[in-house]
Amino acid sequence: MPDSIAEEVEVINSGGPKVDDLPFRPDVSSDLNIEACLDRASRLMRDVVIRQLQSMVEGEITSETPPDGQILDTIGSVVQSIVSGTSLDAHNETITKLVINQENRANLLNNLILTHDYERLVGYLKARHLLEKHMLACLERNDLTPSEALAFMKIVQTETAEIQGHIASGASSINDIGALLNKVDYATQTGEKELAKKFKNSTPHDREIVRKLIYKLSKVVKKPT
């Protein structure tokens, strides 16, 4: 077994063991350890990294190193000033710009990252669906070894238990789906704010009249036809 990534790339380049020939396939005669079967996933992922490095070596793909950026440059300058004992005054404006109001910055970025995670979730759910379809199709093969069958059974049992637990835990009931959607709908919220601006200078009497009209209108809309 090669001791380094470079040696593994060399093995592949020299016509050595291919990915399908690597000794990661469960041995029917001796390897019936389910956990050991599943641990091979990390080794299979390593094979992908090796192929990626091989493609880079062969020039099929390129990997450009991005520049360090202003923040790392500033950190380097600050450290250099500390090591050399020179004044940090020259970095004052840059540092202030980078670190001012960090609590609000962190709050803003955390909320943006949370919204980005919504997008990531959709992608990962689609990927999981495709992988699970592929895995379930593999279960229909008639050449599964005992080790492979046990490994798949472990995955199925684990996932089934997790799904059942998730279902059993339930979720908060949504009594008014329309109201909930309105609260998270950007267009609706923006429209309500624009409408509120039109009544900004109205008197309490005017607003009460509008409130009664809206109430009557809502009853008409909800009334079954």
Image (tube, grey):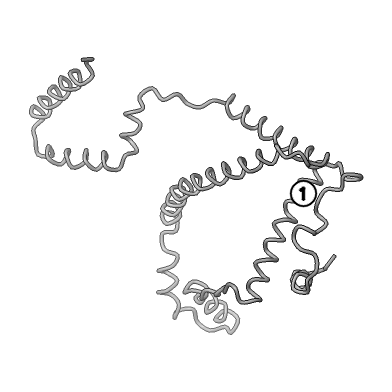
Q: In this image, 66 relative to 135: left or right? A: left
When the figure is inspected, residue 54 is found, relative to residue 152, above or below; the finding is: below
4 in relation to 145, above or below = below
* Helix, strand or loop under label 1: helix
Q: Residue 163 placed where, x, y %? A: 61, 31
- The quarter of the picture where the C terminus appears is top left
Q: Which of the 4 image quarters holds residue 139? A: top right
> Measuring 46% from the left and 45% from the top, which residue is drawn there?
118
Mark 1: which amino acid? Asp
In the drawing, does residue 184 fall left or right of residue 71? left
x, y percent for residue 149: 78, 38
Q: Residue at x 17, y 18 (%)?
A: 220
Is 184 positioned to the left or the right of 148 in the image?
left
Against 132, is 106 above or below? Answer: below
178 or 98: nearer the viewer? 178
Q: Residue at x 56, y 41 (%)?
A: 129
Residue neighbourhood size for the residue with mark 1, other residues' Cα within 10 Å, grouped as few (<14), some (14–19), many (≥20): few
Residue 95 locus on image (x, y percent): 45, 71
Residue under numbered circle 1: 39
Residue farthest toward the right in the current orientation of the protein? 29
Quadrant that contains the N terminus: bottom right
Estimate the x, y position of residue 119 in percent, counting from the top left: 46, 48
Comparing 212 with 216, the one in front is 216
Q: Residue furthest front?
A: 142
Up-down relation of residue 169 to residue 138 (above or below)? above
Task: Specify the quadrant of the image occupied by residue 104.
Answer: bottom left
